[in-house]
Image (cartoon, grey):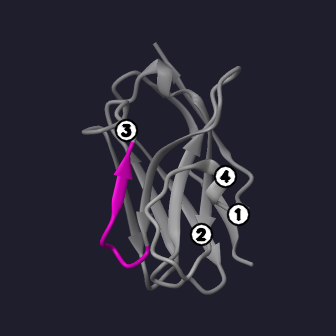
Amino acid sequence: QVQLVESGGGLVQTGDSLRLSCVAAGRILDSYIMGWFRQPPGQERECVAALRWSGDWTYYADSVKGRFTISRDSAKNIVYLQMNSVKPEDTSVYYCAVRQSLYYKNTAEPSDFGSWGQGTQVTVSS
């Protein structure tokens, strides 16, 4: 089972940039999908960005397209979420998650991800 630890959250102002990191302990196969999720208060958890470890598929929620970028460092088993031009509505706890499957399925559904980090808080002030 892959264990995940997020870092990089904090308090920023509208328009600022922030980079979240997720360190994965354990073997990551090319078929695995790593994702960043958030769950604002009173709302369902949503995927903001995801990628297949092989590098041949990425996903972005419409709300973050053009502002957020997901990337990985395969040598260090780290997934990043670069957040640019942040907005107050980006305020949330951000979670890193992994779908550990040998099957190449493109998915950003939270229920398809089995291992989750503890989350890191991002607060954007207006």
Looking at the image, is 119 positioned above or below residue 123? below
Location of residue 3 in the rendering, given as x and y in whole percent from the top left corner? 72, 71
Instruction: Please give the label number shown on residue 55.
Output: none
Under mark 3, the amino acid is Ser
Location of residue 8 in the rendering, given as x and y in whole percent from the top left corner? 55, 50
Of pointers 1 and 3, the one earlier in the residue sequence: 3
Residue named by callout 1: 114
Of pointers 4 and 3, the one earlier in the residue sequence: 3
Q: Judging from the image, what secondary structure is the residue with disc 4 in?
A: helix
Q: Nearer the viewer, mark 4 or mark 2?
A: 4
Part of the protein shown in magenta:
53-60
Of pointers 4 and 2, the one earlier in the residue sequence: 2
Looking at the image, is 12 positioned above or below residue 102? above
Residue lying at the far left in this picture: please name it. Answer: 66
Residue named by callout 3: 17
Location of residue 38 in the rendering, given as x and y in whole percent from the top left corner? 59, 39
Under mark 4, the amino acid is Ser
Of pointers 1 and 2, the one earlier in the residue sequence: 2
Task: Calculate the distance from the C-alpha at mark 4 to the C-alpha at mark 2.
Answer: 21 Å
